[in-house]
Amino acid sequence: MALSGSFIRNPIPDSNFGLYCTWTGVQSAVGNYTDITLKTYLRVYNISVGTRSASTTIDGKSSSYVAPSLSRSGASSWTDLLLNTRTGRVSHNADGSKSVTLSSYYAANLTYSGTYVASITASGSFVLDAIDRTAPAVTLQTSDITG
């Protein structure tokens, strides 16, 4: 069970290039839900591309966006360039349990290290921390009751 995690999709074998995603969750016991913030990065060495269509999906609810232009040259190491941050509310089951699937899509349409990459989809499934649905114990004492 978790309230954070990550997943990656590398479309080119033996390369770090790909779509890298991290997520965190904040729970509400009263509302029986988790607000999940999903961040999507493009892991690159050097790159120069214009805007691209992209989307994120949190528990089946998809949201499209335009990923920004990216430019990085002369690099000496891999880096993660932020494409998007999105927060979505995920309702838990009546017993407080919940499994969630997260995914990100990037319409790459580029050639990287000599390999054409049309698009990249990264996804992961996670079991969220259960939310306690038992009622709290309440103790009530009375004394000196008069008519």
Image (tube, grey):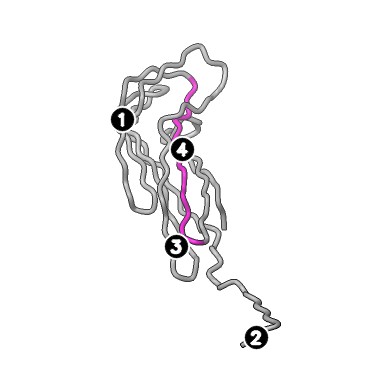
Q: Earlier in the sequence, mark 1 or mark 2?
A: 1
Amino acid at circle 1: Val
In what element is the residue under mark 2?
loop
In what element is the residue under mark 3?
loop
Q: Earlier in the sequence, mark 3 or mark 1?
A: 1
Q: CA distance from mark 2 to mark 3?
A: 46 Å
The residue sitting at 50% across, 28% down in the picture is 80
- Residue 4 in percent (x, y) is at 55, 48
Q: How many residues crowd around disc 4 within 10 Å: few (fewer than 14), some, or many (20 or more)?
A: some
The residue sitting at 49% across, 21% down in the picture is 45
Q: CA distance from mark 3 to mark 1?
A: 30 Å
Camera-nearest residue between 87 and 57: 87
Amino acid at circle 3: His
In the displayed structure, 122 sits above or below 65; it is below
Q: Earlier in the sequence, mark 4 or mark 1?
A: 4
* Mark linked to residue 92: 3
Q: Tell me if residue 37 is in the magenta stretch.
A: yes
Q: CA distance from mark 4 to mark 1?
A: 14 Å
- Closer mark to the observer between disc 3 and disc 1: 3
Res 142 → quadrant: bottom right
Q: Tell me if residue 94 is in the magenta stretch.
A: no
What span is colored magenta in the figure? 30-45
- Provide the residue designation for mark 1: 66
Drawn side of residue 32 relative to residue 118, left or right: right
The mark tally for this picture is 4
- Provide the residue designation for mark 2: 146
The residue sitting at 41% across, 51% down in the picture is 89
Q: Earlier in the sequence, mark 3 or mark 4?
A: 4
- Residue 107 in percent (x, y) is at 31, 32
